[in-house]
Each structure stands twice: as C-alpha cells, then as structure tokens.
C-alpha cells in the first residue's frame, strides 16, 4: 500500500513541482509577466497542438474515440456546471453565477492532461484527453461565455464560435482524428518533428501556469466564497464521472479511470480569463483556480491511487 502511494506521488508531484517553479520565478520577479505569457502562448499555439496531433493520428479513430465516454463525460461536465450555477444564482446575477459554474466544470485538461494522464495510462489516454478538451473547452467555454456576456446575443455567439473554430488545440485534435480515421500515417520526418515540438508542451504549459498563478491575489473571504466550487471540482465532478461512466454506462475500466482522472484536474486558468473578460466574479474564480491547483497537488495522486490505473513507469 505504502509503495503504491509512493509510486503515484513519484509520478504526479514532479509535474506539480514544475508549476511551483513557474510560480516561484514569477513571484520573485525572475521573469516578467510578458515572459510568462510568451511561454504560455508557445505551448498553446505550437507545442500542445503538435503533441495532440501526433498522438491522435497514431491510432485508429475507433480506438481513440468512444461515443459513450464522450457523451457521459460531457453530461457530467454540464451537470456540474448547472448544479454550481443554480446554487449561486440566489446570491449572484446570471453572469457571475455562470462564471463560478464554469470554474467548477472547466479542468486544466489541456495543460495538465498530457503530462499527468499519459505516464499513467500510456498513449491510450490520448483519446480521453481529446474528448475531455472538446467537452470542457468547446462546449463549456462556449456556453459559459454566452451566459456571462451582458445582453448576450448573436454577436456574442458569433465571437465565441470564431474563437472555437480557430482554436489550435481543437484544430489539432480534429486533424489528428481525421488522419487516424483515414489510416494515413505521418511521414517519418513529420512524426519526429511533431514529437520533438510536442515534447515541450508539458514543461512550458506547467511553467506558464505557475507564473499565471503567481499573479492571483486572494484572501480568506475569497477562500470561503470559492470553497463550494473547489469541492464541486475536485470531489463531486470525479465522483459523478465515475458513477456515469462506470455504474450507468458500464464502460471498460480504462475509460472510467481516464474520465475520473481528467475530472479531478484543477480548474483551468481559461475560466479566470473568461471571467475577467466578462467582468463576472473575477476574484472568486481566481481563488477557485489557485486553491484547486494547490489542493490537487495531493488530491490528484490520491484519486489516481484510489482508482488504481495501470502505471506506465515505476
């Protein structure tokens, strides 16, 4: 038992330690905010798309896409979003309530998914990562943006759709899925290029995440206000995914394990950016992002150990 816990900590804690390095560098002023933004942009625009495109193209679509997983995970995601938003509505207007709901339903699956899930599940985790990104980014981000925007209308929906259509991560997932479905292998030089570039996705994304967290300022009042969303994100969301995928849909264990681990990711910084852009519960969402990330440093290894996924490295 102790050896198993140590094995999971040995896999997960170094990943979160990179976040700590980014936080420390920004907190001590060793790097400027513009440098953090540049590293994050590199990861989002180039490294992460290269990683996902390569992984998705390397396997048949039937292996990487499971309709039951996608619908079940998306249903659980929307359920958490609706639950937290409805719980907040009696105390806040629609926009702030939607922002808090999105914070509970949007995990950092893009930045944390590959470095945490792939060592645990191997390349078979690429499909679940892609489907969780489609659920939490393509659906929740769009829905949250529309609900948060004051006087949301066709102009808001058009702006959100344009953002999604040109999102490089979503484009890489789609392109890789099409290549996998067609059975077209990547040429050797292209595959090596994507592997080399994609190898930078994890470190750069995590470092930029830490630098971004260093900018957030919270107090005890915000901690109390954010506690409900943090509990929903790190406890209720994984539990609901486990119930839906495992007990209701009866999917194979690897799909259930992947879904629970992805749902256990801390809140994405995209939720804070979205709230800030719409001036909706910005401080509360920043507290959710920060505290869910701090707690997940120990909660995620505990979740991984409880559901006992196959460990790819000692």
Image (tube, rainbow, N blue to C red):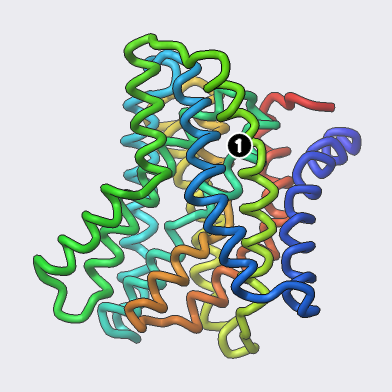
Question: Residue 156 in the image: x percent, y percent?
Answer: 18, 68
Point out the image quarter for the N terminus: top right
Quarter of the view holding residue 198: top right
Q: In this view, does 149 lie above or below 17?
A: below
Q: Between 146 and 28, which is closer to the camera in this rendering?
A: 28
Question: Residue 233 in the image: x percent, y percent?
Answer: 51, 59
Please tell me whether mark 1 sits on a helix, a strand or a loop: helix
Question: Residue 217 in the image: x percent, y percent?
Answer: 62, 85
Residue at image location 79% in from the left, 56% down from the top: 17
Q: Is residue 137 above or below residue 228?
A: above
Label 1 Cα neighbours within 10 Å, binned few <14 / some 14-19 / many ≥20: some
Quarter of the view holding residue 298: bottom right
Question: Residue 70 in the image: x percent, y percent?
Answer: 36, 34
Residue 17 falls left or right of residue 244: right
Residue situated furthest left in the rendering = 154
Q: Return the residue at label 1.
A: 197
Residue 314 falls left or right of residue 91: right
Residue 94 falls left or right of residue 63: left
Point out the image quarter for the C terminus: top right
Q: Between 57 and 309, which is closer to the camera in this rendering?
A: 57
């Amino acid at each position: 038992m102790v050896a198993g816990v140590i094995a999971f900590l040995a896999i997960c804690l170094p990943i979160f330690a990179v976040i700590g390095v980014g936080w420390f560098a920004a907190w001590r002023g060793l790097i400027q905010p513009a440098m953090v933004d540049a590293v994050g942009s590199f990861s989002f625009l180039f490294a992460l798309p290269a990683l996902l495109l390569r992984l998705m193209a390397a396997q048949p679509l039937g292996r990487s896409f499971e309709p039951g997983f996608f619908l079940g995970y998306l249903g659980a995601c929307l359920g958490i979003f609706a639950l937290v938003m409805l719980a907040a509505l009696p105390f806040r207007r629609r926009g702030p309530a939607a922002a808090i709901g999105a914070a509970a339903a949007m995990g950092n699956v893009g930045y944390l998914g590959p470095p945490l899930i792939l060592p645990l599940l191997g390349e078979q985790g690429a499909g679940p990562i892609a489907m969780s990104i489609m659920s939490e980014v393509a659906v929740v981000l769009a829905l949250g943006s529309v609900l948060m925007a004051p006087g949301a209308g066709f102009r808001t929906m058009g702006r959100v759709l344009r953002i999604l259509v040109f999102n490089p991560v979503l484009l890489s997932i789609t392109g890789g899925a099409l290549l996998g479905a067609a059975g077209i292998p990547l040429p050797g030089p292209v595959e090596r290029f994507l592997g080399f570039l994609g190898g930078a996705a994890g470190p750069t994304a995590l470092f930029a995440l830490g630098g971004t967290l260093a900018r957030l300022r919270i107090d005890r009042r915000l901690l109390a206000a954010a506690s409900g969303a943090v509990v929903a994100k790190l406890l209720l969301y994984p539990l609901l995914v486990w119930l839906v995928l495992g007990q209701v849909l009866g999917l194979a264990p690897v799909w259930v394990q992947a879904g629970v681990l992805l749902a256990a990711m801390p809140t994405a910084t995209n939720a804070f950016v979205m709230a800030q852009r719409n001036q909706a519960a910005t401080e509360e969402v920043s507290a959710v992002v920060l505290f869910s990330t701090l707690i997940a440093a120990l909660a995620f290894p505990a979740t991984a150990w409880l559901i006992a996924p196959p460990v790819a490295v000692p």
